[in-house]
Image (tube, rainbow, N blue to C red):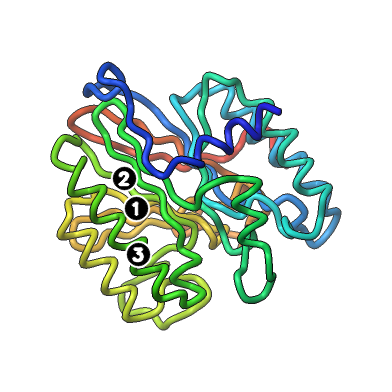
Amino acid sequence: MKSIKSFLLCAVAVILATACASKSQPFCFVQISDPQIGFNPGDERATIGWFSQTIDKIIEISPDFVICTGDMTHHMFSDDWQIAAFDSLMAMIPESIPVYFTPGNHDYRTTEWPGSREFYAEHYGENKFCFMHKGSLFIGFDSNLVKEGLTEQEEEQFEWIGAQIEEYGKMADHIFLFQHCPVVSTGVDEADSYSNFPEPYRSKYLKFFAEHGVEAVFSGHCHRSAEIEVDGVSLVNCGACGIALGELNAKGEPNTHCLNVVEVTPSAACWNIIPVQNVE
């Protein structure tokens, strides 16, 4: 199945691009987040239609690749139809457009759903990735390790992120990071909540991003688009391509199913979170 082949792209923690592909060139990629097949107060199968239109938009844009920042389904570990629907829709994306994933809190929960992390690994592959593409460095990591308080695994991953930036960051025009839960949702002084990293992790990661030249950190989880800048680092939260939560996004615009189109040149990067067309 094509979708499984795409998932296996995450099986290798570090993916080195060819010398040609790593040269600085303009390109475009798409971030999607929280398709969360099955999550809807009404007809849960309506989520299939929403994600189908997201896939259509991706095919229309034809980016170099797609990064999904988690929550592929609502109950991945227990609802086979959700997994099958997600896989079937992902299979519509052409083979020429690779897809990379970071896990969300609905993709596995170590303590609450025993065995779900192993299930995730078998079905989707590794929980992190690193690759160079046309002169930019892309690193995806697992925010569940922070949110679940898995301190040893979190520290190991944190050191791994630093090692990737140390090895590849100097040759990169841009450094982009991706995870499911945002480090900050509204401001650095906000209270610890479901929607951010608790202290002391919040300060730890914000300091790390600023000191290591990270340009932007992309996340999801909140089902509502927002962006803030902390010490020169853009923290970009993409709303859901599944159900939107709340009538308005952080800009006061209608909060609807959306995706994030990121245009990159050697000297600049810009992102534009846009509605998925034809979604009622």
- Tag 2 near tag 1, CB within 8 Å: yes
Disc count in the image? Answer: 3
Q: Residue at x 57, y 43 (%)?
A: 258
Quadrant of the image occupied by residue 208:
bottom left
Which residue is drawn at the image coordinates 50% and 34% (left, top)? Answer: 66
Give the structural element (helix, strand or loop) at label 3: helix
Q: CA distance from mark 2 to mark 3?
A: 20 Å
Of the numbered discs 3 and 1, the one sitting upstream in the chain is 3
Image position, residue 196 (x, y; %): 44, 71
Residue behind mark 3: 156
Is residue 31 found left or right of 60 in the rendered image?
A: left
Q: Quadrant of residue 152?
A: bottom left
Disc 1 crowd rating (10 Å Cα; few below 14, some 14-19, many 20+) is many
User: Which numbered disc covers residue 217?
Assistant: 1
Residue at x 19% of width, y 59% of height: 210
Disc 3/disc 1 C-alpha distance (Å): 20 Å
Instruction: Write down the residue under mark 2.
Output: 176
- Across and down, in percent, residue 154 comes to 39, 68
- Mark 3 vs mark 1, foreground winner is 3
Toward the top, the furthest residue is 20
Amino acid under disc 3: Glu
Identify the residue at image location x=24%, y=52%: 163
Q: Nearer the viewer, residue 167 or 212?
A: 167
Q: Amino acid type of disc 2? A: Phe
**Figure check: 127 above or below 105:** above
Element marked by disc 2: strand
Q: Quadrant of the C terminus?
A: top right
